Image: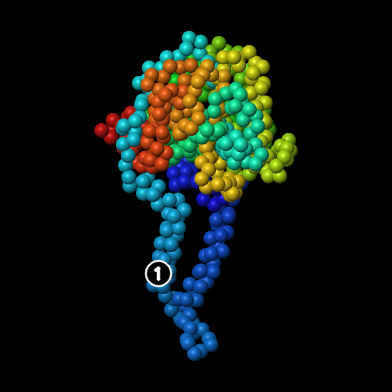
Amino acid sequence: MKGIDNTSFDQILFTMTQPIRGSDSGQIINYIIDPLLEALLITVPLVTLLYFATTCSFKFGSRYLQRSPHFSTKKVVFVGLIGLVFGIFLSGKEMGYADIKAFYFEHTNLYDKYYVDPQEVDLEFPEKKQNLVYIFLESMESSYFSKELGGIQEHNLLPNFADLAQNEGINFSNSNKLGGMLQIPGANQTASSMVAQTSGLPLRPSTSLNSSESSEENSAEYFPGAYSLGEILDEEGYNQALLMGSEAEFAGRDKYFSQHGDYDIRDYHWAVETGRIPEDYYVWWGYEDRKLVDYAKETLNELSQEEEPFNLTMLTVDTHFEDGFATEDTPDLFGDQYSNVIHDSDKQISQLLEWMKEQPFYEDTTVVLVGDHLTMDSDFFDSVDPNYQRSVFNLFLNTDKQNVRNRNRQFSAVDMFPTTLSALGVEVPEDRMGLGVNLFSSQPTLTEQLGYDRFQNELMKKSDFYNEKLMQTKEEGEQRE
C-alpha cells in the first residue's frame, strides 16, 4: 500500500473489509491521491501510445504516419490483457504469493489442536481483586530504545519506559536486552491487536463485522465465538471503561468492547457530548494524547470511588503513522517529527504513571503498557539492519511476580490474554487460554513450540474451526448443522 510500510496481505484485506468511519481523513486522501497520480502518469502515456498504435501505421522508407480509419479492437484487448496480467503479477509480488495462497487455498488444524476455550478454564481470582489499567500504545516498538538497550536508535527515544523496564517492572523480550512480542497475522493493526491481546485469538479479515458502519445499530455480533478479558472481569464484578481519543466505531472497536465486557466507551464522541471539547474540535484522529491523559485521570478518580474493582483500558494515538502528531508542546529534540512524538509519548504516559503512584488506588492496581503493532511509518526504518528483529513493546507494573523468565522469549499478542490475568494474581490452570500461554509460567508459547515462521504461516491459513465455531453465532452454527 502506498505510503505505508510493514504491511501484509491480511492487513490490507482486513482494512478493506472494516468500517473506515472514524479514521483520519487526511491519510485516506493521501492513499487515494498519491497512487492515483502515479497511475495517471503511467496510464496517460500508455493510452496515447495505444491510440497511435491502433489507428496509425508507419511505413518504412517513408517519413510520415499513415492514419487508419479503423480502430483495432483486437490490439486494445491484447494490450489490456497484458496490462492486467502484469498488474496482477506486481500486486501478488508486493503482497506475497505465499500469503495469498495460504489465505485462500490452504487449511490448518491449529485451532482444532491448540485452542483452549476460556469459558472452560476454571479461573481462581484472589480474595482481594486487583484493579487493571491496560494502556495500548499506538505503534510502540522496542526498536525505539537505544542500541545499547536493545533497540536501533542512536539516542534512546523511550528513556522513562527503559527506566521502568530495568528497575521496576517486567518487560518480556525476544532478546537478552529490552525487547517485546513478535507480530503475527490477525494482530497487526490496532483493532485486531486489541482483540487478540484480550481474547487470545487473532482476528482474521472475514465476517467479523456483519453490518453497516453505524455504531447505533449494535445488533451485529462481533467475533461471537470469542470470550475475552472484558467478559471475565465483567462477570467478576469489575467496572470497565474504554478511553480513546479517536472514534470507537473505527474498525468496529465499539462493538467488540461493548459486546465483550460491557465497557463504558469514552471516545471522541464522548468528549464532545460531555462538553470536554468543542463540537468542531478535531485534530489527527480526534483529539490528542495530552487531553487523553487528563481524561484518564478523571476516569480513574471516578472508577476508584466505587467499591468494585475496575479496569480502565485506553488507547493512545499521537504516535500513529505517518510521522505522528506533534503539538506546540512537543519538544523538538531530534530534528525528526516522529522521533520527537515518540519521545513525548514516553514522557506523557510516564507522567500519568507518576500521578497514579500518588493515588490511594495504585497499591491495588496492576498496569500493563503494550504496543498494538509495529509502526507502518513509510520511512522511519529505511536504514535498519535487515537482521534486526523488530518487536512490539510491553511492560507489566505492580505485579507480585518474581524470578520471571522474561528474556529470549518468543511470543505474540495472543499470549497477553492469560498473562494479564496472571499479572492480576489470577490462577490460570494449565496456563493456556485461547491460543495464548501465560508468560509467567514455565509453559512454552505456540511461537516457541512451533517456531515463529510456522506459527505465522498456520495463522494465515483457513480454518473450519475458526470460521464455524468462533466467527459464527450459536444460531448460525445450528442452522449450518
Looking at the picture, how far across and down is residue 222, in whole percent? 43, 32
Residue 29 or 157: which is nearer the viewer?
A: 157
Nearer-the-camera pick, 276 or 257? 257
Res 192 visible: no
- Across and down, in percent, residue 128 comes to 51, 10
Q: Quadrant of the C terminus?
A: top left
Q: Is residue 31 above or below residue 163?
A: below
State the count of labels: 1
Picture quadrant of residue 303: top right
For mark 1, give the secondary structure: helix
Image height of 275 relative to 99, above or below: above
Residue at x-position 73% and y-position 35%: 329
Residue 122, percent from left and from top: 38, 17
Q: How is the image coloured?
A: rainbow
What residue is drawn where x is 37% and y is 36%? Answer: 450
Q: Residue 276 appears in which quarter of the rendering?
A: top right
Residue appearing at x 36%, y 32% in the figure: 470
Q: Amino acid at mark 1?
A: Phe
Location of residue 139 with respect to 115 vertically, above or below: below
The residue that label 1 is drawn on is 78
Kindly identify the residue that appears in the image at 44 percent across and 25 percent down: 438
